[in-house]
Image (cartoon, grey):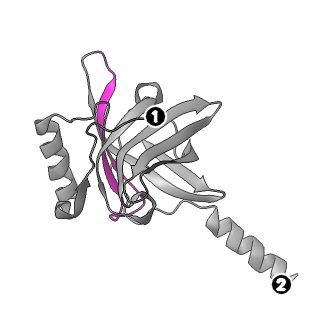
Amino acid sequence: MRHLSIWLSIMSLSACTLIDKPVTVVKPFELNLYLGTWYEIARLDHSFERNMSHVTAQYTLQGSKVVVTNRGFKQDEQQWDEANGKAYFIDGSDQGLLKVSFFGPFYGAYQIHDVIQAPNGQYTDALVIGPNAQYAWILSRTAVINSNTKQGFINKLSALGINTNNLIWVDQGALKDDR
């Protein structure tokens, strides 16, 4: 019985979404304006995207779940790599705060800190923070981001205490696509 209690405690903790660095998120947020393909313009270094270029993220809605497909080219292996995950809203669908998982019951926070909207309302650029200051992404609907938007996002990252000198600017240039 004691082992079952320990196991259940561990499982309940592992299923939680921990946020070490909560940030202000977009509110109101409209998921339908966020769905679709995003290009990763910049990121902080982490093991699951190390040495990757041409990274994109695809978000589609499937019931109450957001299906996430991340794809990138592994430079060192000269091949495409893909990861599939799922995301759910944490505190209501009207704010850009989700939990995302690529590994079973383990979820990480996905905090959409800022978005730029086109005149038609579509989100065109986004600044996303993970569960802590070690995870941050600058995303755009296009492979190249407007320089004013880029600088604005860099300033926001700095204001959050994130060292922007550690950003990796993702190569989105021409590459033979054998998808």
The numbered mark at residue 2 is 2
Compared to residue 4, the image places residue 36 above or below, namely: above
Residue 106 in sight from this viewpoint = yes
Across and down, in percent, residue 66 comes to: 56, 37
Q: Of the residues shown, which amino acid type is indicated by label 1? A: Asp
Across and down, in percent, residue 150 comes to: 17, 42
Q: For the residues marked 1 and 2, what is the alpha-carbon distance in whole angstroms?
A: 41 Å
Occupied quadrant, residue 166: bottom left
Secondary element under disc 1, as helix, strand or loop, is loop
Q: How many marks?
A: 2
Residue 33 lies within the magenta run: no
Q: Of the residues shown, which amino acid type is indicated by label 2? A: Arg
The numbered mark at residue 94 is 1
Task: Answer with left or right where residue 103 lies relative to residue 99.
Answer: right
Task: Answer with left or right where residue 91 lies relative to residue 12.
Answer: left
Compared to residue 172, the image places residue 108 above or below, namely: below
Question: Which residue range is magenta in the image?
Answer: 120-138
